[in-house]
Image (tube, rainbow, N blue to C red):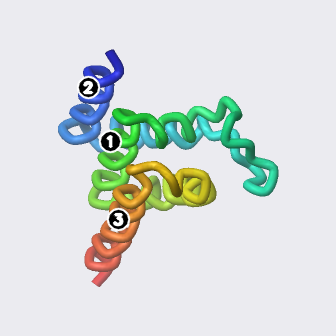
């Protein structure tokens, strides 16, 4: 089921190499079709939108954000750039606050690493 597959991806993000983390982040980012948020249709087949709104897939995004902030800030910023335009369409989901919190905490982690 999706629950078990999301657990596998989360585990890869947590214990895999930085190279693995980057590859998974890039795969999530490259799957996004949102080029113009003004023309976005929430019913479209945008893969990253469906991962974000999925009860199990959103945990993959949360884990990717947390791990990328710590290990590869460049990918963190790329993920945030792909996700941020979609958050307005996820307002009514229970996951949007958790995603926003991961983005904010990731930004704090990166700031602390710079100082």
Disc with the residue nearer the chain's start (2 vs 3): 2
State the separation of the CA atoms marked 1 and 3.
13 Å
| Residue 91, image x, y percentages | 52, 57
Q: Which mark is residue 59?
A: 1
Is residue 78 in view? no
Residue at image coords 39%, 42%:
58
Please tell me how crowded label 2 is: few (under 14), some (14-19), or many (20+) other residues with Cα within 10 Å.
few
Return the residue nearer the eye: 54 or 108. 54
Residue hosting label 3: 101
Q: Is residue 74 above or below residue 23?
A: below
Residue hosting label 2: 8
State the separation of the CA atoms marked 1 and 2.
11 Å
- Element on which disc 1 rests: helix
- Element on which disc 3 rests: helix
| Residue 44, image x, y percentages | 70, 34
Quadrant location, the C terminus: bottom left
Residue at image coords 73%, 55%:
37
């Amino acid at each position: 089921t999706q629950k078990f597959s999301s657990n596998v991806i989360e585990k890869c993000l947590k214990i895999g190499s930085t190279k693995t983390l980057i590859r998974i982040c890039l795969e999530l980012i490259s799957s996004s079709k949102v080029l113009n948020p003004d023309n976005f249709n929430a019913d479209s087949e945008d893969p990253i939108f469906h991962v974000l709104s999925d009860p199990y897939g959103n945990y993959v995004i949360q884990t990717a954000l947390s791990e990328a902030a710590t290990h590869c800030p460049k990918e963190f910023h790329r993920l945030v750039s792909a996700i941020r335009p979609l958050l307005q369409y996820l307002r009514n989901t229970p996951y949007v606050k958790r995603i926003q919190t991961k983005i904010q905490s990731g930004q704090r982690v990166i700031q602390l690493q710079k100082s």
